[in-house]
Image: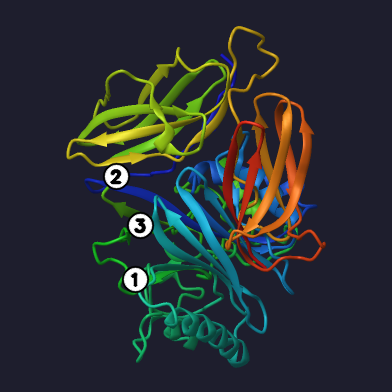
């Protein structure tokens, strides 16, 4: 069997009936750039161990470096996408996310005097959530503490302007003690508490160089200089996760209490390198990777969304022979599964491939399932897995787009109908790639429209051969002027068919 394309849908544990669980992580990359190939394998080892659903990273320095980090996350598969990278006036933030679980709805950057704060609006299985990535002013001392307070004040004022918004704030805060003004600004009850946050780790005090808090320290992973970064061993809690104060209200997304993990910290490495001697939290090769990848440990926490089947899905795979396979870690009160297929990315067009529901085992410890599809013809198709609970709740994964090769000619893909894929990146700035497939040679038009339905520009107007085509739009109109931020539509038309996708340009 040919190697399968993997969409690993990270629902890490089902702690409540009808709750899908996701993992959100922060990780300071230590000034990662496009010339840091020697650290990619270390990051890959860490990502493989954690498998985050969403990860924000700080100290990224180039779009090329972000692409390298995306490769480390994907690790031969195609699970993750990344938000557009914005190269600011200092080190920068980036967001990566599992495309099977998360949809990026919008993004922005909040300016401060030092580093911008990344703002990412996402939907986690359809539930809205704002993610903020911060890298506050470093170092001890009054001026540095005041600078951190100023940065947090800007963020809190922004959050106060977004009432009833659920949010997670992550990053390298460089805060030494809970008495610092910046920390108190995060958590304080004020006249406007829409932006009030709470710390997800309930260990309050002077974290710096304290054995009392050795289990929450995240910097530094090394005692010797290794390609830059801080030394001195684990002695500071710099990497934090805050949530909106009233998040756990039995609605939307909820934080799972006591789930935050400074990954690799076993509590026994105060002032030591993370790989010194025995590390009881991770295998030795993982401790070595944490030591060499960055001077910070990653920190993650678990969140759950309600009204979904209680199932922990490890992966969903489709190969070119139309074998669909999936594996669960855990199931509870589940009837079973359905597999759907369509020539379009709209689930409403999909046809169920299995005659009857594929029964669930409702067992923990990992269960593998498979379906061999004998009905779908050669071509490129979208596949979904539907999970069905006893109480009638269902959840459908985001689609997998994959080619099916028949017996005609396994080396030449054939195409069943006009198909246009989601543009990438999306949101984008300044350019994005539009990929589409036409079933036969035809006159083809590719047009861009604004949200008012006015045509902005034509990218293609002429004859194209059958097969897949990639077209880049550079965000300009017919006059060559860069268009404004906002929603745009791309329509691909042939002699017989026409399809459209939505795109978001953000500056």
Q: Nearer the viewer, mark 3 or mark 2?
A: 2
Residue tagged by mark 2?
14
Residue tagged by mark 3?
259
On the picture, is 114 further left or further right than 344?
right
Q: Nearer the viewer, residue 445 or 159?
A: 445
Q: Quadrant of residue 497?
A: top right
Which of disc 2 and disc 3 is earlier in sequence? 2
Can residue 262 be seen in this snapshot? no
SS for dot 3: loop
Find the distance from the CA under tag 3 to the CA under tag 2. Answer: 13 Å
On the picture, is 7 further left or further right than 403?
left
SS for dot 1: loop
SS for dot 2: loop
Find the distance from the CA under tag 1 to the CA under tag 2. Answer: 23 Å
Find the distance from the CA under tag 1 to the CA under tag 3. Answer: 11 Å
Residue found 54% across the figure and 21% down from its top: 319
> In this rendering, is residue 455 above or below 51?
below
Q: Nearer the viewer, mark 1 or mark 2?
A: 2
Q: Nearer the viewer, residue 68 or 288?
A: 68
On the picture, is 220 further left or further right than 253?
right
- Residue placed furthest toward the top: 407
Residue 86 location (% of width, % of height): 69, 65
Residue tagged by mark 1?
202
Q: Nearer the viewer, residue 188 or 85?
A: 85
Residue 182 location (% of width, % of height): 49, 84
Say which quadrant the N terminus sits in. top right
């Amino acid at each position: 069997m040919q190697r399968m394309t993997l969409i690993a849908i990270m629902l890490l544990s089902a702690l409540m009936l009808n709750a899908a669980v996701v993992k959100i992580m922060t990780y300071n990359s230590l000034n990662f750039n496009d010339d840091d190939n020697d650290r990619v394998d270390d990051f890959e080892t860490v990502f493989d161990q954690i498998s985050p659903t969403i990860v924000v990273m700080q100290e990224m320095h180039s779009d090329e470096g972000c692409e390298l980090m995306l490769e480390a996350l994907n690790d031969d598969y195609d699970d993750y996408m990344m938000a557009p990278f914005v190269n600011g006036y200092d080190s920068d933030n980036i967001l990566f996310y599992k495309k099977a679980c998360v949809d990026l709805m919008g993004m922005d950057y909040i300016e401060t005097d030092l580093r911008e704060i990344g703002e990412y609006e996402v939907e986690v299985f359809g539930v809205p959530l704002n993610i903020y990535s911060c890298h506050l002013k470093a170092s001890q001392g009054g001026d540095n503490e005041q600078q951190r307070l100023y940065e947090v004040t800007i963020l809190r004022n922004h959050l106060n302007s977004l009432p009833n918004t659920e949010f997670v704030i992550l990053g390298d805060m460089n805060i030494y003690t809970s008495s610092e003004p910046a920390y108190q600004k995060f958590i304080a009850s004020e006249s406007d508490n829409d932006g009030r946050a709470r710390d997800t780790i309930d260990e309050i005090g002077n974290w710096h160089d304290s054995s009392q808090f050795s289990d929450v320290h995240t910097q530094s992973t090394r005692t010797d200089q290794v390609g830059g970064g801080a030394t001195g061993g684990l002695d500071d809690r710099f990497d934090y996760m805050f949530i909106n104060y009233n998040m756990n209200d039995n609605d939307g997304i909820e934080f799972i209490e006591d789930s935050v993990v400074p990954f690799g910290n076993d509590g026994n490495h105060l002032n030591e390198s993370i790989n010194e001697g025995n590390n009881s939290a991770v295998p030795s090769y993982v401790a070595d990777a944490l030591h060499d990848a960055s001077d910070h440990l990653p920190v993650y926490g678990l969140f759950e969304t309600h009204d979904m089947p209680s199932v922990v899905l490890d992966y969903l795979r489709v190969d070119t022979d139309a074998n669909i396979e999936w594996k669960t870690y855990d199931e509870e009160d589940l009837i079973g599964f359905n597999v759907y297929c369509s020539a379009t990315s709209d689930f409403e067009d999909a046809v169920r491939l299995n005659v009857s529901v594929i029964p669930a085992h409702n067992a923990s410890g990992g269960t593998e399932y498979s379906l061999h599809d004998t009905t779908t013809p050669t071509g490129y198709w979208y596949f979904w897995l539907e999970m069905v609970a006893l109480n009638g709740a269902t959840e459908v994964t985001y689609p997998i787009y994959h080619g099916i090769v028949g017996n005609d000619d396994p080396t030449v893909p054939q195409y069943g109908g006009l198909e246009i894929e989601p543009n990438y990146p999306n949101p984008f700035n300044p350019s994005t790639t539009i990929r589409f497939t036409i079933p036969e040679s035809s006159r083809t038009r590719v047009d861009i429209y604004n949200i008012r339905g006015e045509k902005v520009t034509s990218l293609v107007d002429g004859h194209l051969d059958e097969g897949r085509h990639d077209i880049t739009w550079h965000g300009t109109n017919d006059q060559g002027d860069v268009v404004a931020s906002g929603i745009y539509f791309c329509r691909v038309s042939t002699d017989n068919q026409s399809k459209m996708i939505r795109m978001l340009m953000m500056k």
